[in-house]
Amino acid sequence: MEKYPTERQYPLWVDNFRETGSCLKRKSPGRPRHVRTPENVAAVRDAETQSPRRSARKQASALGLSQRSLRRILHADLKFHPYK
């Protein structure tokens, strides 16, 4: 048995095309960011400019972030390459 679109689907496709200009399904926004927010990125940037010699471990502790989150912000958002 072949499947055909129902009558209810056509208006949905037309509305979607008018809104997006495409007949493709919209991509879901994904999981929201909780740690790499603009506020945390700015806080890490300020902390790095204030004390660049401070270790990433101490910096993370002072900012209330996990070490991994701090390293992600440094690497992905600020384009820094933290070492040990």
Image (spheres, grey):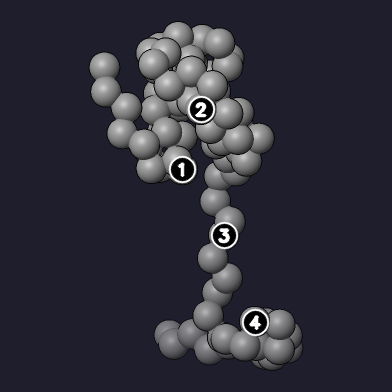
Say which label, 3 or 4, has the lower sequence index: 4
Q: Nearer the viewer, mark 2 or mark 4?
A: 2
Q: Which residue: 36% across, 36% down?
A: 80
Kindly report the distance in space between the C-alpha atoms of the residues bearing marks 1 and 2: 15 Å
Q: Secondary structure at mark 3?
A: loop
Say which label, 4 or 1, has the lower sequence index: 4
Question: Where is residue 57 shown, x and y percent of the image?
Answer: 40, 12
Say which label, 3 or 1, has the lower sequence index: 3
Q: Which is nearer the eye, 62 or 68?
A: 62
In the picture, the disc for residue 77 is: 1
Labelled pair 4, 1 in contact (Cβ < 8 Å): no
Q: Amino acid at mark 2?
A: Thr
Kindly report the distance in space between the C-alpha atoms of the residues bearing marks 3 and 4: 14 Å
Q: Amino acid at mark 3?
A: Ser
Q: Which residue is mark 3?
A: 28
Q: Secondary structure at mark 1?
A: helix
Whether residue 13 is situated above or below residue 51 in the rendered picture: below
Kindly report the distance in space between the C-alpha atoms of the residues bearing marks 4 and 1: 29 Å
Kindly report the distance in space between the C-alpha atoms of the residues bearing marks 3 and 1: 22 Å
Say which label, 2 or 3, has the lower sequence index: 3
Labelled pair 2, 3 in contact (Cβ < 8 Å): no
